[in-house]
């Protein structure tokens, strides 16, 4: 039996029995952790809203066994709030639905990860939630930036300029989800699409963090870019992110 402490973001919760919940967190040092919060559904729970989705917490686990997570689900014994984003996001439908899609994607891309990739995803997640809650950028842009960067961390970085197949210097006109992004005319497979140059420029800006260029983009290019990002994400995850259907786009 041992105690372990870590930082994490609550991704989702599930009811367990009459008063407990299973809490899924993306942690800094241990990747995805699923743990039990006992009595959390009771009115006098000591955890309260500290283990609700979007919460950034310093959490202590009790586990049976020498290796984490040990035998069975660990039990949350303490949780201290480091950042509470749920309340602010709930006031803005676009920000809330974008945040929900971000949480679902973070879980899907790190479900079996430990070590450096999970840490990078954790840091991306914290940054995305802070940015959403601050209202500094349009929520759809924050979501697409997170999706692109998370895919890159997972090893699926798309190209938006040079040819993803032969490396021909960009800009290139054609875009293929299966081929890894933009491709030249010689490498173009059947079914490639031809996005506007402004859309490809926007996606490149989101991937690299050029917010000045991204914020100056037009709504029609944002909509086209969001469609490409969703298709690219679905291809690599082999099934879609359910909460993306609820996201409000400009």
Image (spheres, rainbow, N blue to C red):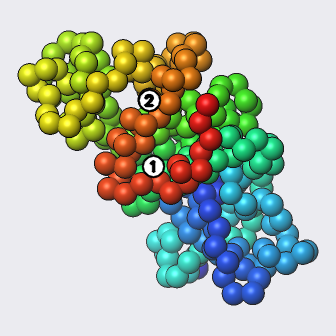
Q: Residue 112 or 60: which is nearer the viewer? A: 112
For the residues carrying marks 2 and 1, which lies nearer the camera in this image?
Answer: 2
Residue 179: x %, y % from top left: 20, 36
Query: In this picture, is 116 found above or below 189?
Result: below
Residue 115: x %, y % from top left: 42, 50
Q: Which residue is mark 2?
A: 225
Residue 167: x %, y % from top left: 16, 20
Split into 4 quadrants, where in the image is the C terminus? Answer: top right
Q: Which mark is residue 57?
A: none
Distance (Cα) linking label 2 and label 1: 26 Å
The residue lying furthest to the bottom in this view is: 17
Residue 169: x %, y % from top left: 20, 12
Residue drawn at 42 percent across, 21 percent down: 199
Q: Quadrant of residue 249?
A: top right
Q: Which residue is mark 1?
A: 118
Split into 4 quadrants, where in the image is the N terminus? Answer: bottom right
Q: Residue 196 or 19: which is nearer the viewer? A: 196
Q: Are marks 2 and 1 in contact (CB under 8 Å)?
A: no
Q: How many marks?
A: 2
Tell me, yes or no, if residue 61 can be seen here.
Answer: no
Label 2: element kind: helix
Query: In this picture, is 119 found above or below 226?
Result: below
Residue drawn at 44 percent across, 29 percent down: 225
Residue drawn at 14 percent across, 34 percent down: 189
Q: Residue 171 or 208: which is nearer the viewer? A: 171
Q: Callout 2: few (<14), some (14-19), or many (20+) C-alpha neighbours within 10 Å?
A: many
Query: In this picture, is 91 found above or below 211?
Result: below
The residue lying furthest to the right in this view is: 44
């Amino acid at each position: 039996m041992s105690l372990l402490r870590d930082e994490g973001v609550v991704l989702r919760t599930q009811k367990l029995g009459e008063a407990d919940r299973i809490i899924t967190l993306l942690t800094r040092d241990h990747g995805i952790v699923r743990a039990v919060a006992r009595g959390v559904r009771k009115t006098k729970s000591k955890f309260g809203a500290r283990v609700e989705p979007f919460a950034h917490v310093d959490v202590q686990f009790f586990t049976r066994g020498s290796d984490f997570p040990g035998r069975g689900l660990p039990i949350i014994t303490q949780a201290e709030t480091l950042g509470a984003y749920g309340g602010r996001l709930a006031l803005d439908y676009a920000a809330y639905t974008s945040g929900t899609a971000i949480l679902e994607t973070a879980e899907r891309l790190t479900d079996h990860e430990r070590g450096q990739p999970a840490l990078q995803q954790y840091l991306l997640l914290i940054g995305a939630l802070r940015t959403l809650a601050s209202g500094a950028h349009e929520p759809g842009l924050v979501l697409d930036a997170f999706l692109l960067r998370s895919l890159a961390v997972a090893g699926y970085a798309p190209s938006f300029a040079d040819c993803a197949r032969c490396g021909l210097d960009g800009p290139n006109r054609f875009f293929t989800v299966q081929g890894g992004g933009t491709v030249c005319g010689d490498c173009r497979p059947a079914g490639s699409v031809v996005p506007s140059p402004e859309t490809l420029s926007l996606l490149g800006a989101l991937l690299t963090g050029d917010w000045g260029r991204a914020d100056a983009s037009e709504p029609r290019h944002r909509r086209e870019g969001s469609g490409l990002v969703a298709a690219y994400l679905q291809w690599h995850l082999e099934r879609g992110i359910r909460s993306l259907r609820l996201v409000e786009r400009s």
